[in-house]
Amino acid sequence: MLAILTTHPIQYQVPIWRALAECGRVSFEVWYLTDFGVRPSADREFGRTFAWDIELLDGYPHRFIKTPAGASPVTFWRCHTRERLRDRMRRSGTKALWIQGWQVAAYWQAVRAAKASGVEIWLRGESNDLAPVPFWKRPVKRAVLGRLFAQVDRFLYIGAANRRLYESFGVVDARLYPAPYAVDNERFAQQAVALRPQRNELRRRWRIAQDAFCVLFCGKFIAKKRPLDLIAAAELLRAEGRVPNIHLLFVGSGQLGTALRRACCVAYDAEAEAVQGAASGDALTGVIAQPLGSFAGFLNQTEISRAYVAADCLVLPSDQGETWGLVANEALASGLACLVSDACGCAEDLVRDRYSYPLGNIRCLADKLERLQRERPSVSFQQLPSIDQTISTINRAYAELS
């Protein structure tokens, strides 16, 4: 059996577990450490309590591992297991243990238990080589991660930058297996097709003019996501008269919400449930200095496709803290073009140089937004990394255990 240990039911991982169960070639069980996101859960960066509005626990075998009260995906020491994983591995006939990184204590416990039980260890993390490491941290990082990596038998890498990280620690090709980061492409494509006839209505709901060039930011309003860079680029495009009809659509919430609203002329704000200023974005386009902005609030999984359909492109301006950026996968699967900072882990794999830009370079961001507005590139979800690729890798790796 393959034991898959992960912190909580994650909306991006669950489709993998279901596809693996449907395929039927691998005996497996998912072991969850917490039920974060299944029950109403507080997210400090979102600044709100939420639960995902899609079913996350059906269609595949799983169980919850005993952890202390208050354990969460962001509490390293508290998120440890109170079970003897060695005993559970022995009872279940575990041949391989798959962990999702090293960010909680339970992963380290599981590695020790697997080694003691003669169980092979698989790792699929999302860290990469893009983030600069302070010189004083480098020896510690190399020692700690080097010790962990020496115990891992197979590395399931999610993309080019993630693979380079492992290679920098001396991991050889024979231990590297492609397992690209992907979302349920077909679900997002189908949702977009179903919603596209409602595009004009969606834009009216958020007070976006029908002829506006609508640029979407989707995520937490926090410093590492750099949403203010998008506003600065929009201001530049308006001031120079290059894209005077630009309109920003913000989906999400977080501590920078007030600053973002102050930097925009707010056309719509779901949190206030009131329109600020004129009754229509059309009336304001030519007379204000600030770019127009609509704030749709937090949109759950069954709602987010509305934003992908209403917008003309998505911008992900994040710094190196964005180890991937699956929102770009979602948008592309929905047929929405993306512009991504080169500090994001997904940049090389999803958009490459043409639709990425140097982190923090507002002029370049503005130039590429103008290009997107002019070119309106078509996007097909068939060109994206898929869950099927990961399933194929898992099947191959598990077969090699026999």
Image (tube, rainbow, N blue to C red):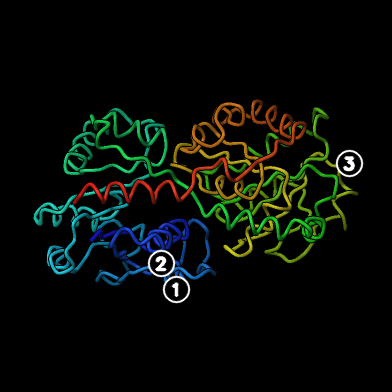
Nearest the viewer among 182 and 366 is 182
Q: Residue at x 27, y 34 (%)?
A: 137
The residue singled out by tag 3 in the image is 287
The residue singled out by tag 1 in the image is 39
Q: Is residue 150 above or below residue 76?
A: above
Question: Can you give x and y, in whole percent of width and height, for residue 33 in the image?
Answer: 30, 65
Tell me the amino acid under the disc marked 1: Arg
Q: CA distance from mark 2 to mark 3?
A: 46 Å
Question: Can you give x and y, in whole percent of width and height, for residue 319 in the image?
Answer: 49, 37
Nearest the viewer among 263 and 61 is 61
Closer to viewer: mark 1 or mark 3: 1
In this rendering, position of residue 267 left or right of residue 20: right
Give the image quarter of residue 194: bottom right
Label 3 element class: loop
Question: Can you give x and y, in whole percent of width and height, for residue 363 in the image?
Answer: 66, 26
Graded by Cα atoms within 10 Å as few (under 14), some (14 to 19) or many (20 or more), the crowding at tag 3 reads: few
In this rendering, position of residue 86 left or right of residue 3: left
Label 1 element class: loop
Decide which of tag 1 and tag 3 comes sooner along the chain: 1
Tell me the amino acid under the disc marked 2: Phe
The residue singled out by tag 2 in the image is 36
Residue farthest toward the left in the current orientation of the protein: 116
Q: Residue at x 62, y 36 (%)?
A: 339
Give the image quarter of residue 20: bottom left
Q: Quadrant of the N terminus?
A: bottom left
